[in-house]
Image: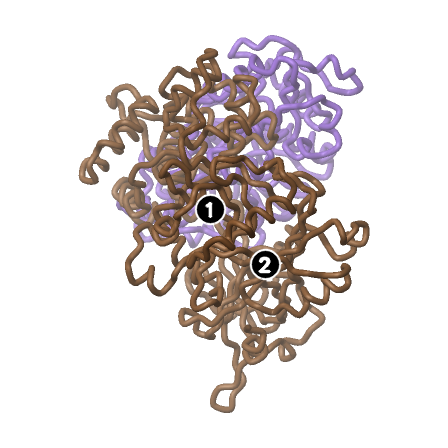
Chain colours: A purple, B brown
Amino acid sequence: MTDTLDPRSWLYPTPRGLYCKPGDFYIDPAVAVPRAVITHGHGDHARPGHRAALATPETLAIMRARFEDMPDTQQQPLKYGESVQIGEVDVELAPAGHILGSAQAVLAYRGQRIVVSGDFKRRPDPTCPPFEPIPCDVFITEATFALPVFHHPSDMGEIGKLLRSVATFPERTHLVGVYALGKCQRVIRLLRAAGWDKRIWLHGGLMALCKLYQEQGVDLGDIAHVGDAILETFRGAIVLCPPSALADRWSRRFADPVPAVCSGWMRVRARARQSGAELPLVISDHADWGELCQTLKDVGAPKVWVTHGREEALVHMARSIGIDAEALHLAGRDEEDG
Amino acid sequence: MQAFAALLDALSYQPARNAKLRLIETYLRETPDPDRGWALAALTGGLDFPAAKPALLRGFGEDKIGPELFHWSYDYVGDLAETLSLIWETGPDAGPPPTLGEVVDTLQRATKMQTPAILKRWLDALDATGRWALLKLLTGALRVGVSARLAKQAAANIGNKSVDEVEEIWHGLTPPYRPLLDWLLHDAPKPSTNAGGAFLPPMLANPIERAELEALDPAHFRAEWKWDGIRVQVAASGGVKRLYSRAGEDISAAFPDIIEAIDFEGVFDGELLVRRDETVAPFNDLQQRLNRKAVTPKMLKEHPAHVRLYDVLWLEGEDLRALSFDQRRARLEAWNAEKPRARFDVSPLVIFTDWAHLATLREQMTSDGIEGLMLKRGDSAYLAGRPKGPWFKWKRDPMLVDCVLMYAQRGHGKRSSFYSDYTFGCWREADGKRELAPVGKAYFGFTDEELRWLDKWVRDHTTNRFGPVREVAPELVLEIAFDGIARSTRHKSGVAMRFPRINRIRTDKPAAEADTIDSLVRLMP
Ligand SMILES: [Zn+2]
Ligand SMILES: [Zn+2]
């Protein structure tokens, strides 16, 4: 039976997103749908307006914080490792190691198992449990950093660069561009682990999600809103802000700041220069090339479908080790955070 | 090597001139000899070893990860040395990374056969930043936004000296510059300036427009044609004869015909040209000579070089730079009158009564070898750098032509996600049919906003694809500006433009009304 079942017959891309027919639900759809399974809270995966949404309790909390409480969405929390039946499909969520609450959707139907990994990374992250490789028949993987040039160095090494720069320019303010969801809180935790116990200042746009992380039990130490504090306060300080704020009026309140950006894209000079960073830090919430290749080996799936990013390179690599790989074009996936 | 790599890395992200200076100064103070001297040589373009060929690097990369993955990686990163540095991995038992002195020393001795093995060993031992710096050094293109002048300024700063003082002795020195650094850092005696044929920092002009001239008194100014060659300095003393580019690069080796013809002592400012039977050849001809490492007898015969002199800085042991332009000019003319020389002549003054008269002369001059006019105050001393006020360049207006966009190609690096290289054409009749013939390629001249617009237009009007190239519907008119045009056998259309750039996007103009090849040919001198 399983030998003859074509996985494409029960899970396939549609203009609204990836659709699971025997369960009649979409995974991370691009538009509002009657029933959605959400892998994690980033904007290109979690959208408002679904009639019913299934996700981890943490992801649902993030969605409520972002989408004005979602009173019209019937919310179905599912913890890691628990399973539920939707239509004829068994659905389970497994840790993806990407951000707080991020999950892989494990779908089983007539003895066949497909894992939709969403976004993931393999290295430890102090804000979420690590990625769990699940053996499966079809593995659906992201390809954000799927080129051999992307090798994320050790995150503590990158944090060390930031702290060295703070020591070299004690009179300047270090403005660190981070994405509000995930990267921000991870960088704070990494700074704490590196021994930075001073107050970390935050741009207003980062406050709400930091508060949510704290409520979910992630200890961020002494953090405070930049607000109207006077300039003198920020000499030698570390201030986190969304990357877009580095170039706008807001950043002009600091005297001679050192702009830093934390992202996997910082590995490539042209991209780093484009970001305006004087201090590019390669810290990413996505798997790098080595992690992507290792993951395909770990899950051992004979078939791999590759979504958003540099699909062609990963498809090429997978085929070279005997995996039946192809690109899957999904609507609504941006080149995101990194 | 790691300290040098960290310096290059920091420089490449540092936009501010003063911060760049501080980074170089700190490095020069803190790094021991001879590495700091080699670094100074690298930053001033003074290192000379056989450059690693791009093919070698590409071969390394393809061996490492296969040609397809390497190709995609290079296409994304946009820089060969950087791509290789990123895909390579530090070897587990590669030993300690090399010092900069060791790299320079080894490469200067190594044979061509040995180089690849040595290079691989170093790539294994360095981290990604170290590999990037090593490969930049080897390919001879640092591109970290530091000019030779800025590096010399940093060197001068560590010894509280002026950069002109450093420039004056520079060409008597060789890397790793121990006497220079000892003078700057340890109060050792100043290295001798008597070494012959030293490069003297040149005086540069500021651009000016017609309207701005009205504020100036024409009686104070002398005019010369601005020749379309390259600015050079001819320096000869004590039997040493040299030809320098404007930046102080020694280009003597490429121009033995000029060097042989030097039968005088002095330092002159002039324009390097290719000249055949009294006529200045198009810039293209000079370019043939510039791009060659070895000069063949055929090249010397068919592209004879010539220097048109317009200033004299030193003459027979006497420094003339403090004299006025008029006084130097009189000395130059007298010197030239003593003895005519085949490879050297003096650029004549353009005589004019007022600005309107000069404007007319400028418009009437249609020679291909002239880019515009130079205006110099008669009372100006020869000052290094680009002082405001004494010297101006009044360039010819660019030529304009309306072309039709035919193909677009993706850019590299920062522009890799945009269609930013444009091939455009003009109309011609062939067999009674009207068709577009490509006449050139442009990849600048537009704003970021225009680039986004063009990129979208290309995507929306694609009719065909060939790899990274898209063919588009022949519907968009681009106004192309360019500085000159010459006959070319390499281009299908038979013409080659100089510095073509997109001046305006003419959405208002129907493609059928774009220019014809014939109208382009008529623009030729
Ligand atoms: Zn994500
Ligand atoms: Zn994503």
Residue placed most toward the observer, B215 or A175 = B215
Q: Residue at x 39, y 23 (%)?
A: B177
Is residue A112 placed above or below B34 in the rendered structure? below
The residue tagged 2 is: B348
Dividing the picture into quadrants, the one containing residue B397 is bottom right
Chain assignment, label 1:
A
Q: Residue at x 58, y 48 (%)?
A: A332
Count residues near mark 1 (Cα–Cα under 10 Å), then give few for <14, some for 14-19, many for 20+. many
Is residue B103 placed above or below B59 in the rendered structure? above
Q: Residue at x 55, y 29 (%)?
A: B164
Residue placed most toward the observer, A9 or B505 = B505
Task: Please give left or right for residue B366 compared with residue A283 in the image.
Answer: right
The picture places residue B239, in percent across and down from the top left corner, at 36, 39
The picture places residue A14, in percent across and down from the top left corner, at 53, 54
Count residues near mark 2 (Cα–Cα under 10 Å), then give few for <14, some for 14-19, many for 20+. few
Q: Residue at x 71, y 71 (%)?
A: B508
The residue tagged 1 is: A307
Task: Please give left or right for residue A242 compared with residue B8 in the image.
Answer: right
